[in-house]
Image (tube, helix red, strand yellow):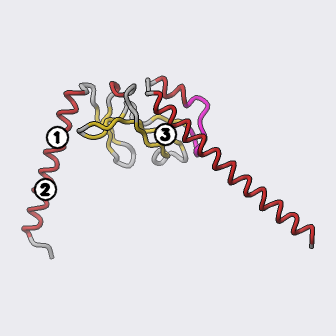
């Protein structure tokens, strides 16, 4: 059983962390008056601002939660107070590592920085090259198996 002193220390630490977080948010709000707070389907939270859309230079590219393979980009900048995401904080760009027909237009519509468009393009190129390599390997193995069958 844990000691009550340990629980008190934990609660004080949590309170200190929350106060610091509130102070960071206050500072971010001064810099980005349009700052908003969003939460996704799996309770991940994002601090978002349209005023950073053309400044974002980092991103995560991943499946959207509970979306059945819908691929999205999550653009953001890193400030001294933490990440600030674009608004919207995630933008659909494809499905199962393949680009949608209008993925670039979707990003441009929200004035997302060209750096993010280039990162998405590189991501898709890498995914497609990997799929080609995997397919070529499967073709080679299938041809070898076919040749083996003909020798029998």
- Taking the magenta stretch, the answer to whether it contains residue 98 is yes
Whether pointer 2 and pointer 1 mark residues with C-beta atoms closer than 8 Å, the reply is: no
Question: For the residues marked 3 and 2, what is the alpha-carbon distance in whole angstroms?
Answer: 35 Å
Q: Mark 3 points at which residue?
A: 72
Q: What stretch is highlighted in magenta?
A: 94-103
Q: Residue 10: horizontal and vertical position, in percent?
A: 13, 61
Residue at 45%, 47% in the rendered image: 65
Residue at 16%, 47% in the rendered image: 18
Judge by depth and name the residue closer to the eye, 138 or 10: 138
Q: Against 128, is 55 above or below? A: above
Q: Quadrant of residue 99?
A: top right
> Which disc, if any, is residue 129?
none
Say what secondary structure mark 3 lies in. Answer: strand
Q: Name the residue under label 1.
A: 22
Q: Quadrant of residue 112?
A: top left
Label 3: how many Cα within 10 Å (few below 14, some 14–19, many 20+) = many
Judge by depth and name the residue closer to the eye, 23 or 144: 144
Name the quarter where the C terminus is drawn: bottom right
Residue at 48%, 43% in the rendered image: 61
Q: Mark 2 points at which residue?
A: 13
Residue at 74%, 53% in the rendered image: 136
First along the sequence among labels 2 and 1: 2
Say what secondary structure mark 1 lies in. Answer: helix
First along the sequence among labels 1 and 3: 1
Q: Is residue 24 left or right of residue 131?
A: left
């Amino acid at each position: 059983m844990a000691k009550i002193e340990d629980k008190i220390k934990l609660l004080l630490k949590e309170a200190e962390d929350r106060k610091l977080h509130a102070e960071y948010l206050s500072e971010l709000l001064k810099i980005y008056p349009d700052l908003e707070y969003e939460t996704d389907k799996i309770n991940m939270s994002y601090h978002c601002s349209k005023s950073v859309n053309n400044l974002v230079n980092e991103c995560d590219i991943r499946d959207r939660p509970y979306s059945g393979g819908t691929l999205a980009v999550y653009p953001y900048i890193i400030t001294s107070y933490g990440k600030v995401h674009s608004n919207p904080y995630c933008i659909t760009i494809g499905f199962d590592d393949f680009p949608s027909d209008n993925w670039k237009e979707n990003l441009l519509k929200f004035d997302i920085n060209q750096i993010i468009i280039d990162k998405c393009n590189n991501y898709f190129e890498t995914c497609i090259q990997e799929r080609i390599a995997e397919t070529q390997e499967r073709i080679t193995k299938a041809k070898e198996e076919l040749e083996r069958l003909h020798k029998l």
